[in-house]
Amino acid sequence: MSRVPRLHIQGDFASGDVTLDADTAHRLRNVLRLAAGDAVQIFNAASGEFAATLIELSKSRGVARLDARLREPGRDTGPWLVAAAIKRGPLDTLVEKAVELGVGEIHPIVTERTNVERVNVARLDAIAVSAAEQCERIDPPAIAAPVTLREKLANWPRDRRILLCAEAGMSIPLAQALAGLDFAAPWAIMVGPEGGFAPAELEMLAAHPLVTGVGLGPTILRADTAALAALAAFQFASPRGRISPRAL
Ligand code: SAH
């Protein structure tokens, strides 16, 4: 039996009927081939997740009646990912996989050797929503507008520590950093561009009080590989890594 479609719907809902916009109605009718009477699950971080029934589905709109609450509202407390912008394809994949691996917010940055002009945040938002629907999260992570590394650090939250994936310079093995980590505290994982961090950037970062340099083994990983490897290690080492998505 194929799983009931999960739909991320904007808004603040708790009971009664939820109106679905034309785009959603189109997707339900023409892509998922659904009709009035079919079951769906609708969710967002502020409302939580509900079992629902489509009671109207036309060309221009839909209506879903909320039947039962399945999950409480809540936002993931996974680590933020601060990643130098990389090429479109790898960045699309990175965002999708980071969502599956429990990332908190995603913060693209521009560093000295970043070789990407612009980042299409709207497209990445859509990828994050689609990934959250598939992997059964209720909170697609926010994607920040790209800023320079310096600006990011200048406006950085005072309590959020950073695991800097440093391909050079002082660093400790990531596994060692995770062994004694306080997973209840706010964290971020930072990764450089394909061309790596500039020496001056690594020096500036090494001197930053919130930064811990970590190594990811003896090989030079592509930026997207490094980000996903670090996110996976973090997720699996954290208490969340011991939760299975479903009861048998
Ligand atoms: N072109 C650079 C490497 C850049 S790798 C060079 O040859 O030196 C892209 C990013 O992935 C790096 O900035 C770093 O954040 C991360 N990374 C890759 N391999 C890593 C490793 N073994 N340890 C820690 N970080 C790594």
Image (cartoon, grey):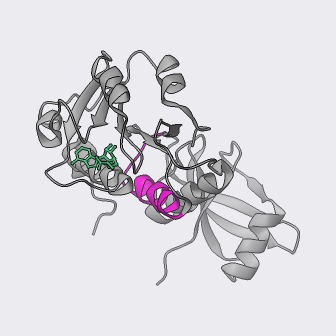
- Identify the image quadrant of the C terminus: bottom left
Question: Given the current orientation, which residue lies at the most extreme right position?
Answer: 60
Magenta range: 89-105
On screen, residue 229 versus residue 77, left or right, reads left
Question: In the figure, residue 130 lies in which quadrant?
Answer: bottom right
Q: Relative to residue 144, is residue 231 depicted above or below?
A: below
Residue 36 shows up from this direction = no
Query: Would residue 73 be counted in the magenta stretch?
Result: no
The one nearer the camera, 42 or 227, is 227
Residue 58, position in %: x, y?
Answer: 85, 74
Residue 181, position in %: x, y?
Answer: 19, 30
Q: Look at 66% across and 79% down and name the residue there.
A: 32
Residue 189, position in %: x, y?
Answer: 35, 38
On screen, residue 60 versus residue 163, left or right, reads right
Q: Look at 36% across and 43% down and name the residue there.
A: 196
Residue 70 shows up from this direction = yes
Q: Look at 17% across and 37% down and name the residue there.
A: 178
The one nearer the camera, 189 or 136, is 189
| Magenta stretch: helix, strand or loop mostly | helix
Q: Look at 28% across and 47% down and name the residue there.
A: 230
Question: In the figure, residue 172 lies in which quadrant?
Answer: top left
